[in-house]
Image (tube, rainbow, N blue to C red):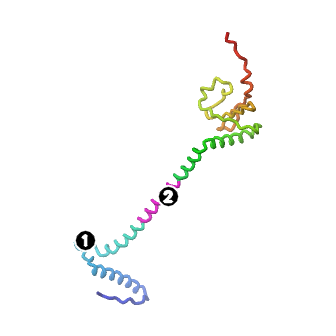
Amino acid sequence: MLNYKQEPETSSTDFFSSILNRKRKQIINLKERGDFNFADTGEKISDRINGKLSNRGRNIWKKIALGGIVLIFVALIATTSYFYVQWKKVKSNPQASSQEEIASIKKKIGNFIELPPSEEPTMATVTDVEKLKNQPFFSKAQNGDKVLIYTNSQKAILYRPSTGKIVDMMSLGAIGTAPAQNLE
């Protein structure tokens, strides 16, 4: 085994010679381990030394890829948990979302007209306007319009959320006072 003394570096040639000495030491270590015979594979010693350095780079990329997979997995679990909790809230109290929608529409309509303060309305959504065309109250209705019905105050309000306008209002008392037809 050869021993090299390392002298303090004083110039650029000493710097390059120290790099050359390190490479020589790597070659000597390869000879001692028995990894020096590369003649049968056609591989160069410098390729073997540089190959070890590139393995380190591959290990870093493997760690980064593993970290990315773990991060995606954690994000997937967090997203799933969020939507599961929201689903449980709706399932436990299905009236909550409709009550929030009624409160929102009452607030918007309340900007235009005075609503009965002590009464909660019943809300319906127009889904098939063709079935309602023969009724005068729904003559201007479109699919998606909301109907607020105040039974105690005898009022019905047709509201269009897409435009934010009240389409029609009607007193429910007028419906009950329609003259009866004589069927004889």
At x 74%, y 32%, the residue is 152
Residue named by callout 2: 74
What is the x, y in percent for residue 95?
63, 41
At x 68%, y 40%, the residue is 105
Horizontal side of 10 relative to 37 (left or right) equals: right
**Residues rendered magenta in the picture:** 61-78
User: Can you say which quadrant of the picture contains the N terminus?
Assistant: bottom left
For marks 2 and 1, give the one nearer the viewer. Answer: 2
**Disc 2 residue type?**
Val
What is the x, y in percent for residue 128?
59, 30
Closer to us: 39 or 153: 153
Tell me: residue 178, above or below residue 66: above
At x 59%, y 32%, the residue is 127
Closer to us: 156 or 140: 156
Question: Residue 65: within the magenta?
Answer: yes
What is the x, y in percent for residue 87?
56, 46
The secondary structure type at the circle numbered 2 is helix
The secondary structure type at the circle numbered 1 is loop
Name which quarter of the figure residue 171 lies in.
top right
Horizontal side of 154 relative to 96 (left or right) equals: right
